[in-house]
Image (cartoon, rainbow, N blue to C red):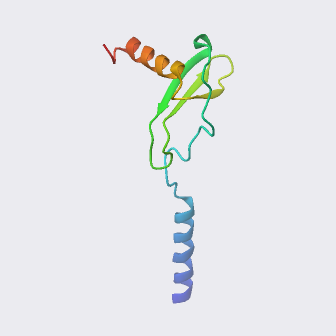
Amino acid sequence: MRSAVFILLACLLFVDVIGMETSLRGRCQCMDTGMNFIKPKLIEKVEVLSPSLSCQHLEIIATLKASGEQKCLNPKSRFAKNFIKDEQKKKGNLE
């Protein structure tokens, strides 16, 4: 009887450990440095993902209006920096 209980507990522990997600975001979503420019009229929204334990890089992900496709922007490009700054101004986050 003890061995059956032990095996059952071991199985439950194994299932619980495998099913646990270690991070909300997972690994980096941008595999390369990203694009330097996308026409602003094609962009529906932009997400800025700060560095975290699972991804040490700043990531800027643009979702395109027509297709819903996501493209990574190079956070060091002049376009990405200006686009983010302009969006923050529109929302009133910067003076």
Residue appearing at x 54%, y 47% in the figure: 26
Question: Does residue 39 appear left or right of residue 89 in this picture?
Answer: right
* Relative image position of residue 63 (x, y in whole percent): 59, 24
Q: On screen, 74 above or below 53?
A: above
Q: Residue furthest right?
A: 67
Q: Is residue 1 visible?
A: no
How far across and down, in percent of the image, does residue 20 sit? Answer: 52, 58
Considering depth in this image, is 13 or 23 the residue closer to the camera?
23
Quarter of the picture holding the C terminus: top left
Which residue is most to the left?
95
- Residue in the image at 51% along x and 44% along y: 25
Q: Can residue 37 be spotted in the picture?
A: yes
Relative to 7, does residue 74 appear above or below in the rendering? above
Image quadrant in which the N terminus is located:
bottom right
Residue 27: x and y in percent read 56, 47
Looking at the picture, tell me which residue is in the foreground, 5 or 25: 25
Identify whether 19 is placed above or below 55: below
Q: Is residue 42 left or right of residue 13?
A: right
Q: Quadrant of residue 34?
A: top right
The residue located at (34%, 14%) in the rendering is 92
In front of the other: 24 or 34: 34
Q: How many marks?
A: 0
Q: Could you tell me which residue is drawn at 56 percent across and 84 percent down? A: 4
> Residue 82 in the image: x percent, y percent?
47, 17
